[in-house]
Image: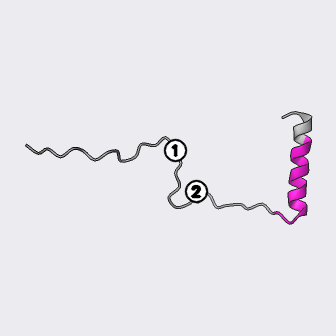
Amino acid sequence: MDTKEKKAYDDAIAEYFANGGKVTVCPVNERTEDLVVNVWKRGPGRPKKSEER
C-alpha cells in the first residue's frame, strides 16, 4: 500500500467512525451456522450405481 492508498484508507475509516460506525468484537471461536470454510471441500459425491444382475 503506497502513501496515496494509505491516506484514502485512513480517510475512509475516519468517515466510517464519524458517521456512527463501531467496531464489533466477537467471542473467541464463535462461528456462523453452516459456514462453508473451504470452497474446494469435496461433497458427498454422486450416488453409486446399484448392482442389478
Q: Amino acid at mark 1?
A: Asn
Relative placement, left or right, of 49 versus 30 is: left
CA gap between label 1 and label 2 equals 17 Å
Percent coordinates x, y for residue 43 in the rendering: 40, 46
Rendered residue at 88%/40% (across/down): 6
Give the quadrant of residue 27: bottom right
Label 1 Cα neighbours within 10 Å, binned few <14 / some 14-19 / many ≥20: few
**Image height of 12 relative to 6, above or below:** below
Label 2 Cα neighbours within 10 Å, binned few <14 / some 14-19 / many ≥20: few
Rendered residue at 73%/62% (across/down): 24
Relative placement, left or right, of 48 versus 24 is: left
The part of the chain drawn in magenta is 7-21
Q: Amino acid at mark 2?
A: Asn
Give the quadrant of residue 26: bottom right
* Residue nearer the viewer, 22 or 15: 15
For the C terminus, the image quarter is top left
Q: Residue 11 in magenta? A: yes
Q: Residue 31 in magenta? A: no
**Image height of 37 relative to 34, above or below:** above
For the N terminus, the image quarter is top right
Badge 2 element: loop
Give the main secondary structure, helix, strand or loop, of the magenta stretch. Answer: helix
Badge 1 element: loop
**Which residue is the site of mark 1?**
38
Q: Nearer the viewer, mark 1 or mark 2?
A: 1
Which sits earlier in the primary sequence, circle 1 or circle 2? 2
Query: Residue 29 has which mark?
Result: 2
Residue extending farthest to the left is 53
